[in-house]
Image (cartoon, coloured by chain):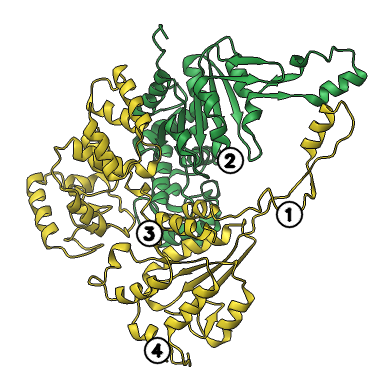
Chain colours: A yellow, B green
Amino acid sequence: MFVNFFYELKRTGVPVSLTEWMTLMEALSKGLAFSSLSGFYHLARAVLVKSESHFDSYDIAFQNYFKGIETPVDVLEQAMEWLKDALPPYMISPEERKLFQEWDLDKLRRELDERLRTQDGQHHGGSKWIGTGGRSPFGYGGYHPAGVRIGGESLNHSAVKVAAERRYRGYRGDETLGVRQFEVALRKLRQLTSRTEGEKDVLDLDGTIDATCRNAGRLELVWDRSRKNTMKVVVVMDSGGSMDPYIDLCSQLFSAVNRSTHFKDLKFYYFHNCIYANIYTHPACVSRYAVNTYDFMRDLDPEYRLIIVGDASMAPSELTMVGGAIDWAEMDNEPGLLWLERITRHFPHAVWLNPIPVQWWEPRLYYGAYTISLVRKLFPMFELTLDGLEQAIKSLKARF
Amino acid sequence: MQKKLQEFRGTANYIASEDLMNSVNVSRALGRPLLIKGEPGTGKTMLARSISEGLGQQLIIWNIKSTTKAQDGLYIYDTVQRLYDSQFGEHDVSDISRYIRLGKLGEAFESDEPVVLLIDEIDKADLEFPNDLLWELDMMSFFIPETGVTITAKHRPAVIITSNAEKELPDAFLRRCIFHYISFPDPEMMKEIVRVHHPDLEDRLIGEAMEAFYWIRSLSGLQKKPSTSELIDWVQALAVGGISLDKIRKEIPLLGVLIKKNQDFDIILKRLSTHGGGQGSSKTKPSIQTIWRG
């Protein structure tokens, strides 16, 4: 029963196991879905999906399997994209609402179709295009209550509609999320001293009491090794102008890293576009805060895990040419690429987090992609999203 | 399981959404633990209390701390007491079973009545903790080597497990659970929830407070959005403080009850002075001073 649904789930990336599938079959045979589609929707989700970050993929799979909705996903996707970076919702009074009640839904639909075809990007405010906070009938958070809501919140009851609504979108693992999620991910970046090395220098009180009592009262001391996190981390951030759109994201990562108290040592440095002979201790990369990059490498031993955050998007000359640095002050006779290579040689555990979505790393799509591809040859590069960060941490933890 | 399971329908002081009740009943019918996740303050722990109340069964709470071991839930062999007795007491120390104390899980297994077992904040414990419980939760039994006794559940307890997602739980453990994510309640439901907690408050007070509350939650850039339990406290504070109704949305008095982070404070105050709370009635721009006077 529904075997294809199982594969559909797998295809959309929900990690379902056979055990869980059998549990669902058992539940169905006990009639727990109450012979209704929405019953089945909730039952299958409770049994098969174990993380809210997969709810959205589940919704997509459900939608694909139990079709019958009109809006193609990718169009919805595109419209949702425009609705990001929302303005705060604007509430209206009931009197205002009345003004809009006579709107003709069909007409709106046709217009939405039209807009979807002609709109080319994000529009917030204003009264025509799909966006947030404005008076346009399309979007959410605006004060055109008779409009077509795209995303946002609402009450809906039929299962397919609920699925189509994709209200768990915000929980997706490949979306960038808040400080807390970053913190949770960073917590995995730890390396405990192992139980097998080091001095046994901590009195294991519970063990001692237990051993003594089992020994019928004759004192027997039990010693144990202390476990400490030995992870040392250095974060180097690009603070250049091209990073401006990602400031929020980077500051979230920054506060998450900063709040992580479990590192043995944590250091922050900054650079502009690429690292050359100098690296900076302050986001304003001026000579007052400069540290010689050789000193930087000498001070931090190779045990440090290096996390570079940057868009890696620049003019190719900044990487490949002598004196290519974007700042005139940066007098240097070696190309940036050489410096980056030097750094990767010094830090065997290094990753590069890029706030630019991974699908743009393809050279024909985006102007910075060429330099991204150059940098990627040197550093394992990950998207600055929750998933990306988790992968990055995995690769940082790998021992050589 | 011959007799039909009693169905959980929520209780008078806990509003459960339709699909939450479904999940509870599914987990009971299948005899699987129910894993509850959700934003802090959405009533995960309260759910277990309400289930036990709704079913008229005793609730056994096992609070997990960072030092808790799976063994603690099964039984503890009190060797110290036995040693003490052997030297100073008159009890018979050859009977080890006298020194076996059952943990919460053991207690739930031994109970003569069906019970509800809450394993609270399982993510606090060590990463391996959930795995160490797999067998016991599956088989509903465990073995005490010191006495050679096997403890088997007389009635399969309804197991509710909550997690704040501080650590990821192992896959093997997840496969055995029924999962439910308590999403943030929509305004309709929120009104009901507040009503349940404060039955005799004016409708308008609650309405105004909710408007302001959802306005704050809608602001982007907050580090921690206020949650249900904070709203409930805030409504209480507003009522006790005798705040006049028209001030609530304009000035958001007693903001400290809702917001716990300094940066969030600043964001809200800034927005409040440019936008006005809720309805955006920005004709009267409150100054910072009037906000603090509230």
Circle on res. B275: 3
Q: Give the Cα separation between the discs numbered 2 and 4.
A: 51 Å
Q: Which residue is mark 4?
A: A324
Say which of marks 1 and 4 sits in front: 1
Residue density around tag 4, few if under 14, some if 14–19, many if 20 or more, within 10 Å = many
x, y (%) of residue A144? Answer: 20, 52
Do circles 1 and 3 both sit on a common chain?
Answer: no
x, y (%) of residue B258? Answer: 51, 47
Q: Which residue is mark 2?
A: B124
- Camera-side residue of B69 and B182: B69
Q: Secondary structure at mark 1?
A: loop
Circle on res. A198: 1
Q: Give the Cα separation between the discs numbered 2 and 3.
A: 40 Å
x, y (%) of residue B111? Answer: 59, 13
User: Which chain does the residue under circle 3 lie in?
Assistant: B
- Camera-side residue of B7 and A209: A209
Q: Amino acid at mark 1?
A: Gly
Circle on res. B156: none
Residue B189, quarter of the rendered image: top left
User: Which chain does the residue under circle 2 lie in?
Assistant: B
Instruction: Please say if the residues under marks 1 and 2 sit with CB atoms less than 8 Å apart.
Output: no
